[in-house]
Amino acid sequence: MIKKANGEKIVTKTEVADTYLKKTIGLMFKKNIPRDYALIIPLKKTKKVTIHSFFVFHDLDIITVSEKNKILEKTTLKALRDYTKIKAKKVIEARKNELNKIKPGNKIKIT
């Protein structure tokens, strides 16, 4: 579950990409990305990564998170054609508009 620091729920269903393969694949090839769901991609250290939506069939909201769970950046990628370079400790991927309740600067809790 992902909540704002004040306890307000953002999404209730989460999955952690805890292997290299899960981190690499992300939400690619998934025909159905459920509502109220987010994929959390933890990184070993804060670093620059490229996130893309090639082979992703839905528009995605992407959030970058610092080591202290502060939202650094939020962007939306168009299905099948977009990419961005970001710096983060964690990356959160979800269907477009699932992460509308949070903005850069907000702190979150991941449980």
Image (tube, grey):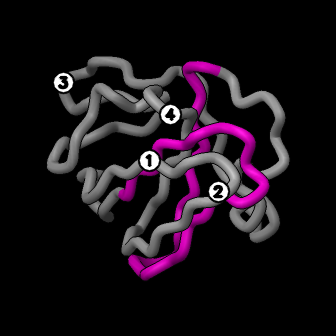
Q: Are marks 4 and 1 in contact (CB under 8 Å)?
A: yes
**Of helix, strand and loop, which mostly describes the magenta segment?**
strand
Locate residue 100, reporting x and y percent.
33, 28
Residue shown at 81% from the left, 40% from the top? 30
First to last magenta residue range: 35-64
Gap in Å between the C-alphas at discs 2 and 1?
10 Å
Residue type at numbered disc 2? Ser
Q: Nearer the viewer, residue 25 or 2?
A: 25
Q: Nearer the viewer, residue 80 or 90?
A: 80
Q: Residue 83 location in percent, x, y? A: 54, 66
Quadrant of res 72:
bottom left
- The first of marks 4 and 2 along the sequence is 2
Q: Is disc 1 placed on a helix, strand or loop? A: strand
Q: CA distance from mark 4 to mark 1?
A: 7 Å
Q: Which residue is mark 4?
A: 96
Q: CA distance from mark 3 to mark 1?
A: 25 Å
The disc at residue 76 is 1
Kind of residue at badge 3: Asn
Q: Name the spot of residue 86 as percent of width and height, x first.
A: 40, 72
Would residue 65 be counted in the magenta stretch? no
Of the residues tagged 3 and 1, which is closer to the observer? Answer: 1
Badge 4 marks a residue whose secondary structure is loop
Question: How far apart are the alpha carbons under marks 4 and 2?
Answer: 12 Å
The answer to whether 70 appears left or right of 86 in the picture is left
Q: In the rendering, which numbered label is found on residue 53? A: 2
Circle 3 residue: 6
Question: Mark 3 to mark 4: distance in Å?
Answer: 23 Å
Depth check, front residue: 85 or 108:
85
